[in-house]
Amino acid sequence: MAIPTERKTPMQRFRVPVLLIGTVVLLIAARGLDALVSGVPVLRFSLGIGAAAGAIFAYTWLSRRVENRVEVTELAAAGRWSGLGHGALIGAVAFLATMLLAVLFTDADVTSGSFGACLGVAGSMASVAVTEELLFRGVVHRILEERTGSIVAIAVSSLIFGLTHSVNSNATLWGTLAIAVEGGALLAIAYTATRSLWLPIGLHFAWNFTESGVFGTAVSGADGEPGLLRTVLSGPEVLTGGTFGPEASLFALLCCLVPAVWLLRSAKLVTPR
């Protein structure tokens, strides 16, 4: 006698496009809200934090509904704060090391910014970190890994992550490749090592916030805005990153490679089915 199999609902059968579209909508909505209040730091901070929290709620609801999951383990409450904290520490230290090397080996012009600008950037980067991690690690990487294994998932999701930054106003080919390697791969490995989105969210936020909210440099080819400081690097583009920002420098690649290797050592890689 044949054993009846559980029928999938239409949403379950089309879970990949539904999840992709859903998380892309969350990302676009967060960017739109940020643009609307970009000139009001307190409102920008509040809306950014609210958008980040709302995106997490929406992703959890969508995952349960579309994938019929009781627990969305990648956003489990257990380990939330430790994951965010450890990720923030890694991200902040990695970018501080990048800037220290840049200041030592290039010409750096540093002027003062404002606390208000820094506060606004914090909210903006919180929504960016959350929505991008939900899309690229929560959906793209996680589902790719189920089908192709960890190595292919890390490589493909990192490349897609880099390519999406090619539309930024000051994007370059080298910058796009650099962000794929140092950002995409590091964040994908952080997820692979923990099976949780909290570590990559904390890492992503702290890197971007330190880069823009503290030092006021360009982020991933987007126009820079002042934070606590306004920093302009002059010298060879291979060391400064040029118009793309410090992420396109060899220093950033080096400083992201170290935590990536460290995290990869503890990662349990999944092999293809």
Image (cartoon, helix red, strand yellow):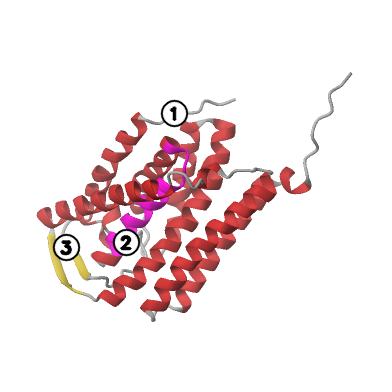
Q: For the point 37% across and 65% down, which residue is it?
A: 222
Q: Residue 186 colored magenta? A: no
Determine whether, in the image, residue 83 is placed left or right of residue 230: right
Q: Looking at numbered disc 3 in the image, what kind of residue is underneath it?
A: Ser
List x then y, in percent, for residue 79: 43, 44
Determine whether, in the image, residue 207 is placed left or right of residue 48: left
Q: Residues within 10 Å of mark 2 (few under 14, many from 20)?
A: many
Provide the residue designation for mark 2.
Answer: 209
Helix, strand or loop under label 3: strand
Helix, strand or loop under label 1: loop
Helix, strand or loop under label 2: helix
List x then y, in percent, for residue 1: 89, 18
Q: Which numbered mark, 3 or 2, is in the foreground of this view?
A: 2
Q: Which of marks 3 and 1 is nearer the N terminus?
A: 3
Q: Residues within 10 Å of mark 1 (few under 14, many from 20)?
A: few
Provide the residue designation for mark 3.
Answer: 234
Q: For the point 42% across and 78% down, which residue is it?
A: 43
Q: Taking 167 as reference, is 249 above or below it?
A: above
Could you tell me which quadrant the C terminus lies in? top right
The image quadrant of residue 23 is bottom right
Q: Looking at numbered disc 1 in the image, what kind of residue is underneath it?
A: Lys
Q: For the point 32% across and 56% down, which residue is it?
A: 206
Q: Which of marks 3 and 2 is nearer the N terminus?
A: 2
Residues in magenta, as a range: 194-212
C-alpha gap between disc 2 and disc 1: 29 Å
Provide the residue designation for mark 1.
Answer: 268
Q: For the point 46% across and 44% down, which residue is it?
A: 78
Q: How crowded is mark 3: few (under 14 residues within 10 Å), some or many (20 or more)?
A: some
Front position in the image: 51 or 247:
51
List x then y, in percent, for residue 250: 23, 47
Query: In this rendering, does residue 178 appear at all?
Result: no
